[in-house]
Image (tube, rainbow, N blue to C red):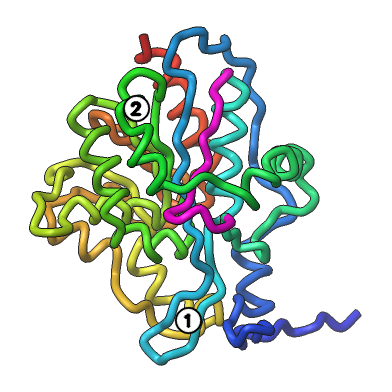
Amino acid sequence: MEQKQLSISPQLEVDGSYKPSEQALAYATSDVTNYEKVDYTKYQGSKSKILIIFTEQKNMTMQNGKMFSTGNHPVEALLPMLHLKNAGFEFEIVTPTGRPVIFEMWAMPQKDENVMGIYNHYKVQFENPGSLQNFVDNSIDKLTTSYGAVFIPGGHGAMLGIPQNENVAKILKSTHQNSIFTITICHGPGALLSTTLDGGDFLYEGYKMTVFPDAMDKETPKFGYLPGEMPWRLGEKLTELGVVITNAEMDDSCVKDRELITGASPLAGNSLGKLATTTLLKELK
């Protein structure tokens, strides 16, 4: 039987943005994930909440002016959430202004019952999240008493509005000063750049991290994953600020350095979830 040749042209969406090509989707996404359920001892302490900061922006403008249809990568968000939920943690879901969470729906693993189960469980909260502005105005003092961690999922959309948000900076300064864990993955470490806003010192100089490789972002336009070159390079900016990036590949590697826990790519969603969960269960009082 003759096999259909998949197109490498990015696919136009109704709003004028482009999602990945047929070939890119076949290469980079799957209907199921490598999620493995772990029977954790349930957390019983007072810091049972996890603040999750999602992007509310969808379209990234590339260097050629074309828009990439992005948002939060569902695997990078939902696999760590599955592990944390199984260990008894609860989620406070926010976006910068309270607009709905945006997911890269073209990357949703539709045949993965566990992932779809947690997505549907929190669907109302994803559609009606809290406002990070409101959290900072009214609840930031509770970070030290009620929250075990802050989680910033990846997806190219994590580079939109999050690194440029002064409230993200306020959250990260609090977590850094009070040794509250920050969990992030793939392009999510872009959020850490927010600490340099208004001339602030970068808080993570010398930290080891795993991050989605710039080299891969440079390659993906060739087979239509991105509709053009990236507007800026995440790894390049982090390296300039003194970050030690420990991975060179788009792989499942993760690293914990002090209060920061990072994962490299969508392939790291499961391993990041396990590392973050076991760390919180061990370290939280």
**Part of the protein shown in magenta:** 88-100
Can you identify the residue that label 1 sits on? Answer: 221
- Residue 243, above or below 90: below
**Is residue 131 in view from this perspective?**
yes
Q: Determine which of the numbered discs, if any, sits on residue 59 in the image.
A: none
At a point 24% along the width and 34% down the height, the residue shown is 174
Judge by depth and name the residue closer to the eye, 71 or 23: 71
Residue 89 counted in the magenta span: yes
Tell me the amino acid under the disc marked 1.
Answer: Pro
- Residue 191, above or below 274: below
At a point 60% along the width and 59% down the height, the residue shown is 103
Residue 3 counted in the magenta span: no
150 left or right of 101? left
At a point 33% along the width and 29% down the height, the residue shown is 181
Judge by depth and name the residue closer to the eye, 171 or 66: 171
Q: Quadrant of residue 175?
A: top left
Q: Position of residue 64 (x, y in %)?
A: 40, 91
**Is residue 263 in view from this perspective?**
no
206 left or right of 234? left
Can you identify the residue that label 2 sits on? Answer: 143
